[in-house]
Image: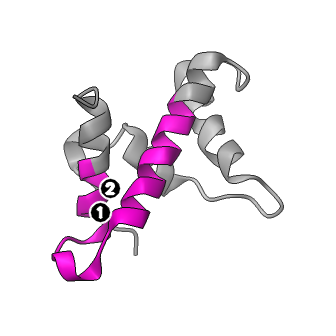
Amino acid sequence: MQREVRPDHRTGPQQLLMDHRVPAGGRVEDAVIAPVAARTGLPGSDLYVRTTAAVAFAAQQAAVTCRHSDSGDDAVTVLNRAFDLVRGGLP
């Protein structure tokens, strides 16, 4: 069963990361680039697409790395906090 991320952000990067699995023999980056390209209508080689995918992937990696089981926050909460930082422009 897939856990739902904030309904108000279902089209955001969190949903892109949760909805797309890496195909067998594929690269993780391609699994993130493809849906960003499809959503924007831009080619996968476009700088905007690649930068957006890289930021989404980096936020997810940071959330996984920084999540501590003793913090009381589940993985989705930490992931949402990481995307909130990105959304806020990393003040």
Looking at the picture, which amino acid does disc 1 mark?
Answer: Val
Q: Say if mark 2 contacts mark 1, CB within 8 Å.
A: yes
Q: Position of residue 17 (x, y in %)?
A: 49, 51
Give the class, few, some or many, for how many residues have Cα within 10 Å of label 2's Cα (few <14, many ≥20).
Answer: many
Query: How far is mark 2 from mark 1, CA to CA?
Result: 5 Å
The residue to which callout 1 is attached is 76
Looking at the figure, which quarter contains the C terminus? top left
Query: In the figure, 81 relative to 86: above or below?
Result: below
The residue to which callout 2 is attached is 79
Q: Residue lying furthest front in this view?
A: 91
Q: Closer to the camera, 1 or 59? A: 59
Mark 1 element type: helix
Give the class, few, some or many, for how many residues have Cα within 10 Å of label 1's Cα (few <14, many ≥20).
Answer: some
Please check the rendered image and state whether residue 15 is part of the magenta-colored stretch, yes or no. Answer: no
Query: In the figure, 71 relative to 4: above or below?
Result: below
Residue at (21, 82) in percent of width and height: 70
